[in-house]
Amino acid sequence: MDQTTPQSQSAIVIIGSRLAGYTVIREIRKLDKTIPITLVTREPGYFYSKPMLSTALASKKEAAQLISTPADGMATQLEMTVLAECDVSAIDTNAQTLKTTKGVVSYGKLVLALGADQIRLPLQGNAASDVITVNDLEDYAHFRSAITGKKKVAILGAGLIGCEFANDLALGGYEVDVIDLAPQALGRLLPEAAALELQGKLSAAGVTWHLSTTVQAIGREGDSLQVTLANGNKVVCDVFLSAVGLKPRIDLAKASGISTGLGIQVNRELETNIKNIFAIGDCAEVEGLVLPYVMPIMQAARALAPTLIGQVTALTYPAMPVMVKTPALATVVSPPAKGAEGKWITTPVEGGLESRFESADGKLLGFALMGTATTQRGALTKEFPAILA
């Protein structure tokens, strides 16, 4: 096994080559052109935009076309070392080293940008193993191959990713069935009135909804899959996509004595309970918050980069509305904090809908904007309190 170490013990090592990992490196390079940086990733190390996976079909882009820069290009551009297709099996927090499939890697400061895995529900039936999840470019390539020449796709999950894929597939000419235990689409983000509006637009685009139920079994019959629902109904499809949510990758951290909860727990400087080890992105939990969206990642990277080179900076989260990529109905939402007290007030507008979640004294604590109302995004964001001040 080759022994591989960064140039010096002051080196910054990042595990993970997706948006969080690469954005931190870009931010570091804006501040310091010379500090040694090594990126370790189990993936090929190329850069691509993961959010594009749920919109690539309608834009007629194959998986390979989503790669904006190969690994060697990223290494050159950011003047760093990339250890691609390299698994990390252990972190020695005392020696400050990583045990990897390409040898021992020393670090001065370590950043865990491990991402998250798609949650896989334990499904019954002889076709349970045929269920597809899309969490990276290789998954997407497999999914595109599976749906080629097919007509019907069923999706388990009516959350953000499920709705985006449903819209994308419908635009691509597929018949789409969406199944969810919740009584509405985007149950964690939208009030009922806004959800019904989105469901109506997606129905018109060719999506069939199966809500307040779940999958009991999935079986193969010839070339088709037969999905039996808990309510007794059956859905026949060619391909079954599961999009029920994400689970932060915490196993490596947990095995290393790093505190974990829902995610890898960090303070406002994004440092874990172990000195010189930090976490960012979908795997990180900041003051109880795990926010698997682009804007929180960008915000966190801008705070973490100066901290890593000695300019300690606390993370703040301003209001960060989430854009739902559903062309059938443009949607922007900034959900109220968990446990916030108030009520949704929905106002139809010409070509859209505005929903405000207000406290008893009229303060804006959340909003959902649809269609033409999305032009109010900037104004309402200014009125909205910071998520983490």
Image (cartoon, rainbow, N blue to C red):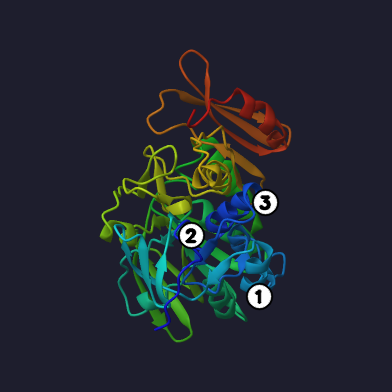
Relative to the observer, which residue lies in front, 35 or 89? Answer: 35
- Give residue 302's quadrant in the image: top right
Relative to the observer, which residue lies in front, 318 or 8? Answer: 8
Residue 272 vertical position relative to residue 367 in the rendered view, above or below: below
Q: Which mark is residue 328?
A: 3
The residue mark sitting in front, 2 or 1, is 2
Q: What is the crowding at mark 3: few (fewer than 14 residues within 10 Å), some, or many (at least 20)?
A: many
Mark 2 and mark 1: span between their CA atoms?
24 Å
Whichever of callouts 3 and 1 sits on the residue coming sooner in the sequence is: 1
User: Which element is circle 1 on?
Assistant: helix
Q: Residue at x 39, y 50 (%)?
A: 276
Whichever of callouts 3 and 2 sits on the residue coming sooner in the sequence is: 2
- Give residue 251's quadrant in the image: bottom left
User: Which element is circle 3 on?
Assistant: loop
Q: Which mark is residue 64?
A: 1
Q: Quadrant of the N terminus?
A: bottom left
Q: Determine if residue 173 is in view.
A: no
| Residue 255 on image: x %, y % | 26, 61
The residue mark sitting in front, 3 or 2, is 2
Mark 3 and mark 1: span between their CA atoms?
26 Å
User: Which element is circle 2 on?
Assistant: strand
Q: What is the crowding at mark 1: few (fewer than 14 residues within 10 Å), some, or many (at least 20)?
A: few
Q: Residue at x 49, y 51 (%)?
A: 159
Looking at the rendered structure, the kind of residue marked 1 is: Ala
Looking at the rendered structure, the kind of residue marked 2 is: Ile
| Residue 127 on image: x %, y % | 37, 78
List the single residue furthest toward the front: 8
Mark 3 and mark 2: span between their CA atoms?
38 Å
The residue mark sitting in front, 3 or 1, is 1
